[in-house]
Amino acid sequence: MNPYLLSKLLRRYFEAGKTGADIYFDADEILLILGKFEQIEDYVNYNDLLQLGLRLHPGNIGLQVKKSQQLLRSKEYREALDIAETSGLVNDLEVGLIKLECYYKLKQYDRARAIVEEALAMGSDFVEDFCEQLAILMNDNDRSTPSEREFIRKATLLFPDNMTLKDEYCFSLETDGKYDEAIRVCNEILDAEPYSYDDWLVLGRLHSLNESYGDAIYAFDIAAVCGEPDAELIAMKAFCYYMNENYEKAIDDYCNILTDEDNETNYRISSLLSDCYTRVDKYEEAYRILKALVFGSSIKDPYNNISFARCCLKTDRKAEALPVLQPTAELFGGGMRIFTLLAYSCLENEMDDLALMILEQILTHLDKHHEEIPAYDSLSDREPSAAANGQAKPLPGTDLIRKFLNRRENRN
């Protein structure tokens, strides 16, 4: 590309745009300017100039290909494919990439793969480009299959120095749950790109998914040296501290990224931060966070309600704990069965005071409605356990509830 010529053409184009005067470019000049607009992602001027070019040179193949790319960006795959297929160009990189993506987006997967196979058979110089594009499309697609993952693996073997393909292969292994192998591939990428922030971040995430939290923290630390750590890195590192029971460090990191926004990410961070505080017996701090979540957030989680009630008891705020019990049961689905589950869950987690408070609520309800209490195995159960049908020994939580009932009847 001649920089002087391009500068001159751009100046002519923009001056004509200011004055509204008619302007003429030959097809090659238009393609040159379009290439610049595409490079800087100025698609407003790109679209205007392409329209002019097609009006001046309607039969130009190069401009037709640009029109096909424009339609592809607009996700008009059928129209883009029609132009590419009628272009008459064979063994052309741009046309091949357009057809490959259109076939894939139109779910004509065999035809997309055939482009790669045909290019490979004819010894085309574009096989590597086609493999890259198809691997990216396969990983972006929710229907990634074993056959597609095998294609990505073979493409990596065919072009072992292609880092894009290795990135896609690493991601494919991660989505397939093969974390050890993904870690191996990620380390190969880092051997070639040792100062890549993104790749160290990926390695840390892979170690975290593999439950190797110490290795994950080490990878996140190196990533922070290679680039400015963002909220994603800090959140993942804090979670690794949390899982390693290093709650104080987790608290520091979570506090650094906590904001006042009411969204799912911030809600999750606040929930984990409150849990960290309770695990180090800082109930006052946990109480403040949980109160904001329970009463101030649009997102509702019954487990946060339970934690809030527990913190209320630990900080001598019993009166504040009682009002959240009924909403907690409603979040779980409502009814006395849910209260039974809550009590049992509290007993399992050694929150005896909260369990007894919930039991008193159950007793009050039973006095009014004379209901029986079903036994459950856990909070995840939807039906009464075998114990409720006399098929097994009642659970400890149910035994305690019935003891309360018997004691109340004896008093009467």
Image (cartoon, grey):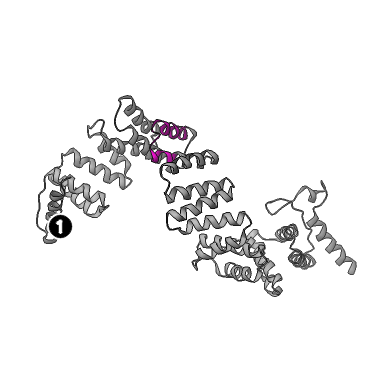
Q: Pick the residue in front: 197 or 293.
A: 197
- Asked which quadrant contains residue 353, the reply is bottom right
Whether residue 412 is visible, yes or no, is no
Say whether residue 155 is magenta.
Answer: yes
Whether residue 344 is visible, yes or no, is yes
Query: Can you give x and y, in whole percent of width and height, for residue 126 in the image?
Result: 30, 33
Other-residue count near label 1 (Cα within 10 Å), few / some / many at <14 / 14–19 / ≥20: few
Q: In the rendered structure, which amino acid carries the disc numbered 1?
A: Phe
Magenta stretch in the rendered image: 147-168
Query: Can you give x and y, in whole percent of width and height, for residue 411 in the image?
Result: 89, 69
As drawn, is 316 to the left or to the right of 71?
Answer: right
As drawn, is 390 to the left or to the right of 27?
Answer: right
The image shows residue 33, relative to residue 355, as above or below, that is: above
Query: Can you give x and y, in whole percent of width and height, for residue 346 in the image?
Result: 73, 60
Q: Residue sitting at 78 percent across and 60 percent down?
A: 371
- Asked which quadrant contains residue 399, the reply is bottom right
Quadrant of image for the C terminus: bottom right
Q: Residue sitting at 25 percent across and 38 percent down?
A: 83
Q: Can you identify the residue that label 1 sits on?
A: 14
Q: Residue sitting at 23 percent across and 44 percent down?
A: 67
Say whether residue 321 is magenta.
Answer: no
As drawn, is 310 to the left or to the right of 411?
Answer: left
Q: Pick the residue in front: 82 or 314.
A: 314
